[in-house]
Amino acid sequence: MDSFDIEGAIAAATYITALYPYVYNTGDLTEWKTLSHPECIFCTSVVEGVEELHGQGFHNEGGQILVEGATAVELNPGRSFSADLSLRQGPATVVDSSGNQVGEPSQEVSSGMTFILFIDQGNWQIREAETKPHEE
């Protein structure tokens, strides 16, 4: 993530996907908010989802994401990139504060995700993200 090029964009998008289950599992949104552009609708929906889940006294367990492939292109030289990731997310279980399972665990899911990333004051920021169905 330290380089502001195609490899850095892929690394930033990969890091963001690792943060996704982390924020739902822990409720710790510090890094997520740092990487999120204020106008990123996806980012805001994650913050709201995490706050609602944890506000009810619940949290997720599991849901880790494996990046199975990644490509990126530079949109605006030295300023913005698009990164496409092929992902597989493991099952997640919602549990209450006592560790009891709430509802049924989610299923493993394969999908694609496109991130629009900007470089702002020497840091990566998610400007937009969109999930796409997995293409077989």
Image: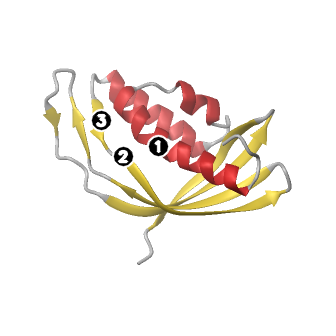
Look at the numbered discs 2 and 3 and tell me whether their residues touch, using CB distance below 8 Å. Answer: no
Marks 1 and 2, Cα distance to the nearest angstrom?
7 Å
Residue 47: percent from the left, percent from the top?
49, 33
Look at the numbered discs 1 and 2 and tell me whether their residues touch, using CB distance below 8 Å. Answer: yes
The amino acid pointed to by label 3 is Asn
Q: How crowded is mark 2: few (under 14 residues within 10 Å), some or many (20 or more)?
A: some
As drawn, the residue found furthest toward the left would be 100
The amino acid pointed to by label 2 is Gln
Residue at position x 25%, y 56% in the image: 107
Check the image and report above or below for 108 versus 136: above
In the rendered view, does 52 fall on the left or right side of 130?
left
Residue 79: percent from the left, percent from the top?
82, 48
Marks 1 and 3, Cα distance to the nearest angstrom?
14 Å
As drawn, the residue found furthest toward the bottom would be 136
Q: Residue 64 carries which label?
A: 2
Q: In which quarter of the image is the C terminus?
A: bottom left
